[in-house]
Amino acid sequence: GDIADGLSRSVENVGGAVSGAFFEPVIRLGVTGLSRAGKTVFITSLVANLLDRGRMPQLAAAAEGRILTAYLQPQPDDTVPRFDYETHLAALTSDAPHWPESTRAVSQLRLSLRVRPAGLLAGLQGPRTVHLDIVDYPGEWLLDLELLDLSYAEWVAKVFARLEGRAEADGYRAALEAVDGAARFDEGTARGLSREFAAYLRDAREAGYSDCTPGRFLLPGEMEGSPVLTFAPIPEPERTGRGSLWREMERRYEAYKARVVKPFFRDHFSRIDRQIVLVDALGAIHSGPPAMEDLRRAMADILGAFRPGRNAFLSRLFLGRRVEKILFAATKADHLHHRQHGRLTAIMEAMLREARNRADFAGARTEAMAVAALRATVEETLSHGGRELDCVRGTLLDGGRQAAFYPGELPEDPQRLLGPARQGAEAWLDDDYQVMRFAPARLRLKPGEGPPHIRLDKAAQFLIGDRL
Ligand code: GDP
């Protein structure tokens, strides 16, 4: 069972730590974020830059020349799909560069580094091997954690409260009208309802909401169409007899928790040492106050998942072990001139402080940053109507034309976006921001040079620098 698994793992860890010379440390780095946040691009560029080490001055071990070699190895987990690094890198670096396919499920990659120890140890010890196991998983799955605390009836009540007033739910509400939970279960009805509910979740996500459980309804992976994914919230009838629709929906909901949610947390989440959470903060700022509000709630929810003692199931899995560092990174910083990066960082830091308070979070070291895993723009200052505008220039995704944009100005004080004054606030990123959909730039990399980025090395230093 769960306890036994956890125990044998912690014994392994202890055994590893004392076995000295043979022991090769493993860092398990989780990479998550809601879909389109930039996980795939982040991992691809991070690995390419670590393999080549030409563009990582803020990663101390790289700057000090202590990373002797870096190479990909088969990962230790035989049943987890491998992150398709080669295909993704080929997409980004081909003659007609394009963005790779996004994350749909869990995948993994092992990057091994031969590292010369720093400082005094350097003379005493030879180089050692450190394995970096990168685990890519959808942020949607992380938000499923709340289901473990909720019975089917409680979850239904919570979902119905959320549906209230959301136009995206009109179709689902209509589908529920003909439904009687006391009636005999029938597969066709269940399938119709779950399809309709999944469509609502997709529309809600599209509209910027992130409270979209069950997460697998959005990214089903290989379980698409199976009974554990064929349920939906329905109103509780007076009598819920055996064989009724309500009873079977309840059973499938419980099966989803036991067979889908728990295994994910047990097999992947509970083994993570360091975590990066990618956030499309610029997109949310551009979308306006409701999307910002939702992002703030999602950050607190995500942080809550890492809170020690969050719930009994997780505490048993972690057995006192915990994630040591969590980085919240605003992605796509290359949409802004670097003069505005400080402001974006300040906004992320303010949101992180608030998320820590909301989630009552203490423990792991947290930090916030603005990064671009793959820089698709160059900076340019243009004179316009007697003003100097700090622009970014890139190739448009639609049409392939080059264009320079001034995306608007972020507020200097993050509270102008986050504080009570934000209601009715001006649009911080103007309409131009919307059309800024750039294609990756064509790269001419010299040997030993990774793809261009913004602060990927600083992110790597925070996440793994102390272990190299
Ligand atoms: P995932 O769903 O989290 O795996 O997201 P992806 O890594 O596939 O990224 C989604 C999209 O965001 C990409 O197709 C790009 O359009 C954009 N994107 C991601 N990272 C960057 C970046 O560093 N710079 C720019 N300009 N766009 C990015």
Image (cartoon, helix red, strand yellow):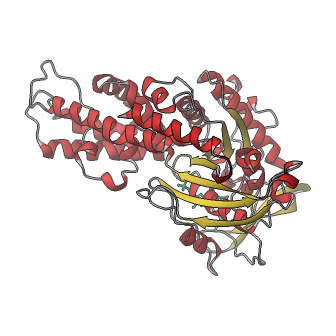
Say if residue 165 shows up in the picture: no
Is 348 situated left or right of 157 in this image? right
Up the image or down, 266 lies above or below 456; here it is: above
| Direction right: furthest residue | 386
Q: Residue 155 sits in which quadrant?
A: top left
Q: Residue at x 39, y 34 (%)?
A: 2
Q: Compared with residue 385, is residue 162 higher up or lower down, i.e. above or below?
A: above
- The x and y percentages for residue 323 are 61, 36
Please state which of residues 315 and 256 is positioned toward the viewer in this rendering: 315
- Is residue 381 left or right of 165 when viewed as pictured? right
In the picture, the quarter occupied by the N terminus is top left
Tell me where residue 435 appears, x and y as whole percent. 63, 59
Residue 184, image x, y percentages: 7, 33
Q: Residue at x 38, y 41 (%)?
A: 263
Q: Residue furthest bottom?
A: 95
Residue at x-position 72% and y-position 42%:
428
Q: Position of residue 452 (x, y in %)?
A: 75, 65
Q: Is residue 382 above or below residue 326?
A: below
At x 75%, y 51%, the residue is: 468
